[in-house]
Image (spheres, rainbow, N blue to C red):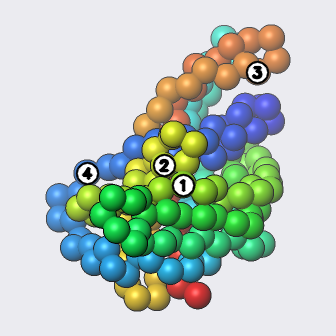
Amino acid sequence: MKKFALFLFLATITLFVSCGDDDDPIVIDQSLIPGAWDLTEVRSENGKASATVQGIPLSGDYSITGKDYAASAVFTEAASESEPNTVTGSGGFTLVASFTLPTQDPIEIEETIPELIGTGEWTVSGNTLSITVQQETTSYEITSLTEQSMTLKIAIDEEIMVDIGNESVTASVTGDQFITLAKQ
């Protein structure tokens, strides 16, 4: 069970892959994004995971929170339209994942995340912030943006393969993850 919980924890860290649709998107003032931002919160909502391990179907809830925040990101607007907007992340935080199976005590795992974003480019389209780092683009729904704070949401709905012991397992992971930043 602990290996499965660890798998789920690691999977949720790396599955920042898609953005959910919103029937009533907020209006984004892109001019509020450039600047230095500190990570202040990481959390999840509606986290569900399921897999079959050694012939036994498992499903449960998971939640993600963060602590020991020392991460920041600097969003820079391009000087001209022919250049990209850039983002540079530094520092990390500790991610705390809790996985609960029915009739079992919760399993909690902590993982140090050494780098928040990396260095890359960013764009905004509607209420979607897309960040490309090393030719991989991740899209975040901007759920809140003011002069002092920005909250990003990532909707996860993925099936992935992972090796647990000598067995390859297909796991389904769903939920929403939120990242909150405060302007320096």
**Residue holding disc 4:** 21
Helix, strand or loop status at disc 4: loop
Label 2 with label 1: CB-CB less than 8 Å: yes
Label 2 neighbourhood size at 10 Å, few (<14), some (14-19), many (20+)? some
What residue is shown with label 1? 120
On residue 132, the disc is 2
Q: Residue at x 33, y 58 (%)?
A: 82
- Viewer-proximal residue among 70 and 66: 70
Of the two numbered discs 4 and 3 on the same chain, state the one appearing first in sequence.
Answer: 4
Q: Earlier in the sequence, mark 2 or mark 1?
A: 1
Give the CA distance from mark 2 to mark 3.
31 Å
- The residue at the point 82 percent across, 17 percent down is 165
Contact between labelled residues 3 and 2, with CB atoms less than 8 Å apart: no
Q: Tell me, yes or no, if residue 146 can be seen here.
A: yes
**From the viewer's perspective, is 76 left or right of 42?**
left
Amino acid type of the residue that numbered disc 3 sits on in the rendered structure: Ile
